[in-house]
Image (spheres, helix red, strand yellow):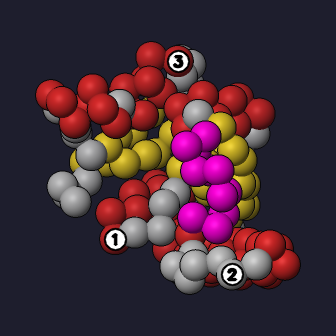
Amino acid sequence: MEVSVRNILVPVSISEAGERVCAYGKLLAEKLGAHVTALYVVEDEEPEGLRALTLPALTSEDEIPELEHAALQGLREHVLQHLGERVSLRVTAGDAAREIVRVAGEIPADLIVMGNHGRKGIEKALFGNTVEEVLKKAVIPVLSVPLPEA
């Protein structure tokens, strides 16, 4: 059986922990000659969408498109800096695990590289574990990168 990895999906977050995940995705892509698709999922609980990436409070609805554009530009810069130039960026909204699996099927990805906070106990019950859900639903390999506790 021949195994080939041509497309890697890397769900991203703008954080130091997210940089660790990007480092693994970038390394694998370089070694395997694969293309990377970075995915940012705006969770259902984040009704403000990309505005969740910005710090200033909104003072009027007129500022929303401008702030969303600035947030998207910041996300693009983050992805270019940490994943390199041979990368595509997708932004979607919904349940993170469901969106990761859906996009992996669409592109089609051969591998998913994602971070795992390793939540346990009550923290896991309250916040869930996206990696665990992706592992249950994905039909391709998932590389789980352990992340330091926040």
Q: Is residue 149 visible?
A: yes
Question: Under tag 1, what secondary structure?
Answer: helix
Expressed as whole percent of the image width and height from the top left, the position of residue 47 reads: 65, 50
**Residue wearing tag 1:** 16
Count residues near mark 1 (Cα–Cα under 10 Å), then give few for <14, some for 14-19, many for 20+.
few
**For residue 38, side relative to residue 14 (left or right):** right
Q: Say above or below: 144 vs 1.
A: below
Q: Earlier in the sequence, mark 1 or mark 3?
A: 1
Q: Residue at x 48, y 60 (%)?
A: 13
- Residues under numbered marks 2 and 1 in contact, where contact means CB atoms less than 8 Å apart: no
Mark 2–mark 1 Cα distance, whole angstroms, equals 29 Å
Q: Is residue 6 visible?
A: no
Q: Residue at x 37, y 48 (%)?
A: 115
Residues drawn in magenta? 42-52
Q: How many marks do you count on the picture?
A: 3
**For residue 147, side relative to residue 102 (left or right):** left
**Residue wearing tag 3:** 137
Expressed as whole percent of the image width and height from the top left, the position of residue 92 reads: 71, 47
